[in-house]
Image (spheres, helix red, strand yellow):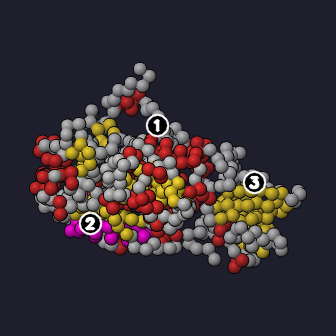
Amino acid sequence: MPTDYEATSLRDLLCGSVSTSLIGQTVTVCGWVAKRREHGEHLAFLDVRDHTGILQVVVDGTVDARSEYVVRVTGTVSHRPEGTVNDRLATGEVELTECTVEILASAEALPFQLDDRIDTDEQVRLRYRFLDVRRDAMQRNLRLRAAVNRSLRAAMDEQGFCEVETPLLWAPTPEGAREFVVPSRLHPGEFYVLPQSPQIAKQLLMVGGFDRYYQIARCLRDEDLRADRQFEFTQLDMEASFVTQDDVMAFVSRAVLDAAEAVTGVRPGPIESMTWTAALDLYGTDKPDLRFGMQLCDLSEVFAATDVKAFGAPTVKALRLAGGAELSRSRLDQLTDAAKELGAKGLAWFRITSDGLDSPLARFLNDTESQAISNVDGAEVGDMVFCVADEYAAACKVLGALRVTLGSRPVGEGPHHYVWVTEFPLFEGIDDDGNLLAAHHPFTMPHPDDLELLSSDPVKVRSQAYDLVLNGWELGSGSVRIHRADIQSQVFSALGISDEEAENRFGFLLGAFKYGAPPHAGFAFGIDRLVAIFAGEENIREVIAFPKTQSGSDLMTGAPKSITARQIRDLHLKTTKGS
C-alpha cells in the first residue's frame, strides 16, 4: 500500500507505484496527461504521468483532458486485457478502470514535444525550462544529482565533518578569477563580491577550532562559459586540521566512491595517484583519462644525435595507435594540421607494416631509430606511431591532445576511472614585473623536501597541491595550507608581494594566523561535473535545473535585465547604457 511519502490529501500513491499487488483496489493518482487516445465516442485512454512513471487510465465516455492537462484520477486497479500488456512500462501489466477524472489545471499547446526521442533546439528548451524539466532525462538527471548530494553529506558526516554555511556577500579579493560585484546601498561607493569559493572563510574556521568543516557551497565566477563551466556552480568544499595531504585525499575518496556506489550500484576500486610530472610525461596532461591506454613514450635519447632534421629537438615523444595503419592520408593531414595549431612544428607518422615502417621519413632513419619507433608501446603490424619533436612541455601537450582526439570516449562511458594527481609545481610562469606566479594560490604549502629551494631555485619547488580527475575531467583541487609565518613570508617574497601588499590583500587571514593556526589542508570539487559524468552528459547544463546559456543569459527569465531608475539611485550608481 502507499507510503507516507506518496499519500497526500489529493492522492493515494504515485503513478509508478501502481502494480498487480493492488488489483481490485480503488486508488487515486495525480499527474499530467502524457497522451490521450479515443476509441469511438464511449471510451478514452489517458496516459497519466508523474515523476515515477506512466499509468494507463481507461475512461468510459468522453473526457476533456488534453496533453499536459493536470488531472486527478480515481479508479480500480485492473489487469490489462490479454495482448495489451506494455513491457516497456513498469506499470505495463495494469491500468485503472471505472475511472472518474477531475481536471486540476488545463494546458495550452506546448512549444515542443516532451519526448526524449525528439531533438529539440537547446535555446527553445532553455526558454521553456519549466517544461523541459518534465522530460524523463531531466527528471532523471536532477534526481541523480539529489542522490549524489545525499551520499556526499552522509560520507562527510560519518567522517566527523561539521557542515557550516559561509557568507555569499564577501570582501573583494584582488586575485583569482573575475568576481561578480554587488553594490552596497548602506555604504555608497563600496561593494561586496559573490564568493569564488569559501577558501578564506574555511581557513578561518580552522583557526576557530572547527577541526573538520564541509559545505555544499554555491560559488560564482564571472568567467566565459563553456561545456563544463557556468557562472554559478556547486562544489563540495572541505577543510580539516591536523591532517596531511594523504588524509584529505582519503576523506574525499571515501565521499566520491560512496556517491558513485549510490547512483550506479557499483563501487569503483581504490583511487590510484600519480605525480604531476608522471601525468605529463605519460599522458601529456595533468587531467589524464585513464579509461584507455596509449601512453606517451620518450625517444629523446634515441634521437639525441640524429641526422634527421625533423627530429632535431630536445624532446622526441611518440604515441602508438592500435590499428591506426588504416587511417587515410586526408585524416593524417587533419591530425597534422591540428598538431600545428597546438604549436607543433609538425607531426611525424609511421605505419607499422610487415615490411617495416611506411612513412615519408622512414628512409632517413638509421636502424636504431627505426627499431625504436617499431617498438613503441609494443607496436604491432597494422598500428600507427605518431612522433612530435619539440621542447619537452610542447611535445607532451601536443601528443597528449592527439591521444585524447584518437582515444577518447563519451564522458559517461564506463568504467569511472578516478586518479589523484599530486606534487604540482608551486609556481608557474613569471609576470610582467619578473615575479613568479602562484600555480594554485599563495597559501599552498611547499613540498617538505623542497623548502630549501624557495630561496635558491624556487621554480623547481613542488607544492603539496593535489587534483582529483575523473574520465579526463578535473573534478577539483586542494592543497595543504601554509600556517607558518616564516614559510608564508618566503612564498610572498618569491611572488613579489610586499608586507604592505600582503596586509592589504590578505590582512584579516594573516591576522587570524597570529592567534594560533593549526596545520590544515582542504579540497573542493565540482558537483556539477561529477553528476554530469554519472549522467553521461557532455555539458553540465544538462544537470542544472536553471542554467545560463553560453553567452551568460537566462532565456527563461530574460536575465540579465535593467533595473529601475530608483534602484540605480538608491545604490548610488550611474549607468552608461545607451549613452
In this view, 482 is above or below 19: above
Q: Which callout, 2 or 3, points at the residue further toward the start of the chain?
A: 3
Query: With 230 as the anchor, is 68 left or right in this view?
Result: right
Q: Main secondary structure of the magenta part?
A: helix
Picture coordinates of residue 170, whole percent (x, y): 29, 46
Quadrant in which residue 30 is drawn: bottom right
Query: With 357 as the anchor, is 390 left or right in this view?
Result: left
Determine the residue positioned at 35% across, 54% down.
303
Identify residue for label 1: 560
Mark nearer the viewer, 2 or 3: 2
**Label 1: few (<14), some (14–19) or many (≥20) C-alpha neighbours in 10 Å:** few
Picture coordinates of residue 452, whole percent (x, y): 12, 58
SS at badge 2: helix
Identify residue for label 2: 245
Picture coordinates of residue 317, whole percent (x, y): 39, 55
Find the residue positioned furthest to the top.
579
Report how far apart the C-alphas of labels 2 and 3 lie in the structure: 61 Å
Quarter of the picture holding the C terminus: top left
Mark nearer the viewer, 1 or 2: 2
Query: Residue 65: which numbered mark, if any?
Result: 3
Of the residues shown, which amino acid type is indicated by label 1?
Answer: Pro
Of the residues shown, which amino acid type is indicated by label 3?
Answer: Ala
Determine the residue positioned at 45% across, 72% down.
268
In this orientation, which residue lies closer to the viewer: 550 or 95? Answer: 550
Quarter of the picture holding the N terminus: bottom right
